[in-house]
Amino acid sequence: MPRRFNEGKALDAVIRHIEQRDGIRRAGDGRSPDDAADPDPQRRVDYVVTLGARLYAFEHTGIEPFDKFIEMGEHNRAFFQPIIDRFKGRPGSESWELMVPIGASTGLSGRQLRAVQKALGDWIEANVPAVPVTRYGDRYQPLSRLAPGTPFEFELYRRSFDFLPGGHSELSNQLHILYFASGDVQSARVVRLEKTCDDKLPKLGYWKRSDGAKTVLVLEENDISLTNHQRVFDALTDAEAGRTDIPDEVYVVGTSIEPWHVTCLRRDGKTYYDDGERFHEVDPKTLTQLTKR
């Protein structure tokens, strides 16, 4: 489910990864020119710090597949939470997954919203026995319906973890909401990353020219349904095409589930496709909030 972003901790996650990878440590000079409102707007990057013998300048941005995605996600969270709670803590070792349009709850409010919640919950309860149970990792066999009183189509899946020791997983005994979107999501992603480049890269370039800083762009994603690192890298490559101010290093920090994951998309001439620097785990509870956001 989409949530707000975690700038300060996402930056700390990347810095810790660089420290561990390169065997260096940060100095005590870390600061946020953006928080301090540097007199020169072009110097207001999110964070600067010396790592080893080199100054680094960081810019962070949360990425969403298309405009108003986060807003839709927040509305969906309020809409689906009572349904999730209704089926929480069931016996057994199954996970139920409801695949819905990202705009499922758009336009629903008040009495209508509550009526649709009840109709959807009642349908799941009455029809889930008819959904084939799929062993985790095998091909899904969903049951797809437009339920009476529900203004959107959906697919319901059941998957089993019986093969695990004790038949248990942290995903068991819960209803999970997943999303799909119509239209060309990847093109919309490119457009949003083009805006990110326009907003962020000139400031990083300023620090590189004036202070010799190594420049780092940190992209945070918290969408488990429509976003993956390969798609982000491909979209970023298109968005950066023709630019002369691309940063030295680019990372994606995935924060939709714990532990978080840090993946390097590009550095030292290597990219996501030919470098093994992917999905390094980090516990967000161990991270420091480096900025006010």
Image (cartoon, grey):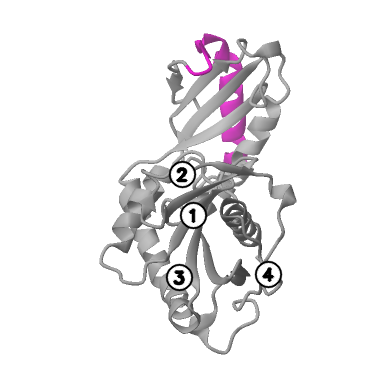
Q: Earlier in the sequence, mark 4 or mark 3?
A: 4
- Circle number at residue 103: 2
Q: Earlier in the sequence, mark 1 or mark 3?
A: 3
Q: Is 202 or 225 nearer to us in this picture? A: 202
Q: Position of residue 291 (x, y in %)?
A: 66, 68
Quadrant of the rendering where the N terminus is positioned: top right
Kind of residue sitting beneath label 2: Gly
- Circle number at residue 27: 4
Q: Residue at x 52, y 42 (%)?
A: 105
Q: Secondary structure at mark 1?
A: strand
Disc 4 to disc 3, C-alpha distance: 24 Å
- Circle number at residue 251: 1
Q: Is 198 or 241 nearer to us in this picture? A: 241
Q: Secondary structure at mark 3?
A: helix
Mark 2 in CB contact with mark 4 (< 8 angstroms): no
Residue wearing tag 3: 200
Q: Earlier in the sequence, mark 1 or mark 2?
A: 2
Q: Main secondary structure of the magenta part?
A: helix
User: In this rendering, is residue 259 above or below 88?
Assistant: below
Q: Position of residue 82 (x, y in %)?
A: 67, 35
Which range of residues does the magenta coloring cover?
A: 111-137
Q: Secondary structure at mark 2?
A: loop
Q: Position of residue 216 (x, y in %)?
A: 49, 64
Disc 2 to disc 4, C-alpha distance: 46 Å
Horizontal side, residue 8 vs residue 66: left or right: right
